Amino acid sequence: MITKEDVKHVAKLARLELTDNEIEKYSKQLGDILKYVEQMNEVDTTGVEPMPHAIPVTNVMREDVVKYEQTREELMQNAPVKEDGFFRVPKIN
């Protein structure tokens, strides 16, 4: 059973300000939720494999394939300022 003190403690951790009516309401609601979870714990799940998702999930991403690879010389042609084969950029303070 969830007590009013339990609800106050959780509200404090979540930085929520609850009225006395809300504390009363939430203690009953949380108690009902926990009763339902206890009912679910009574179900025999022997032989049931745990699953991360309710439905099968497959990767829909395509294979990563390089179509055109630029050479260093081609890339350096775009550099406004270069030095010793590198991009020259302003110093960051």
Image: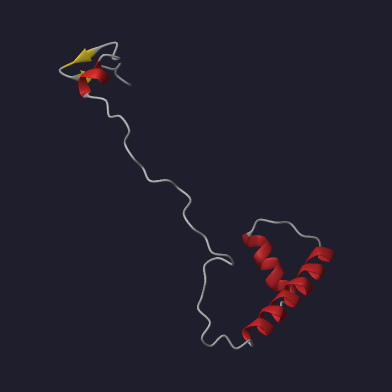
Among all residues in the image, which is located at the extreme front? 67
Task: Please give left or right for residue 86 compared with residue 6 in the image.
Answer: left
Among all residues in the image, which is located at the extreme top? 80
Among all residues in the image, which is located at the extreme left? 84
Q: Quadrant of residue 81?
A: top left
Screen quadrant of the N terminus: bottom right
Q: Is residue 24 above or below residue 40?
A: above
Q: Nearer the viewer, residue 62 or 48?
A: 62
Q: Nearer the viewer, residue 44 or 60?
A: 60
Q: Quadrant of residue 16?
A: bottom right
Res. 16 in view: yes
Q: Is residue 81 above or below residue 29?
A: above
Q: Position of residue 66 (x, y in %)?
A: 31, 36
Task: Please give left or right for residue 4 compared with residue 62 in the image.
Answer: right
* Residue at the (52%, 67%) spot, across then down: 52
Q: Nearer the viewer, residue 26 or 12?
A: 26
Q: How is the image coloured?
A: secondary structure
Q: Position of residue 57 (x, y in %)?
A: 52, 60
* Residue at the (66%, 67%) spot, across then down: 9
* Residue at the (25%, 18%) spot, across then down: 74
* Residue at the (55%, 65%) spot, across then down: 53
Q: Position of residue 14 (x, y in %)?
A: 64, 58
Res. 87 in view: no
Q: Position of residue 41 (x, y in %)?
A: 62, 84
Q: Quadrant of residue 54?
A: bottom right
Q: Number of callouts in the render? A: 0
Screen quadrant of the C terminus: top left
Q: Is residue 78 above or below residue 61?
A: above
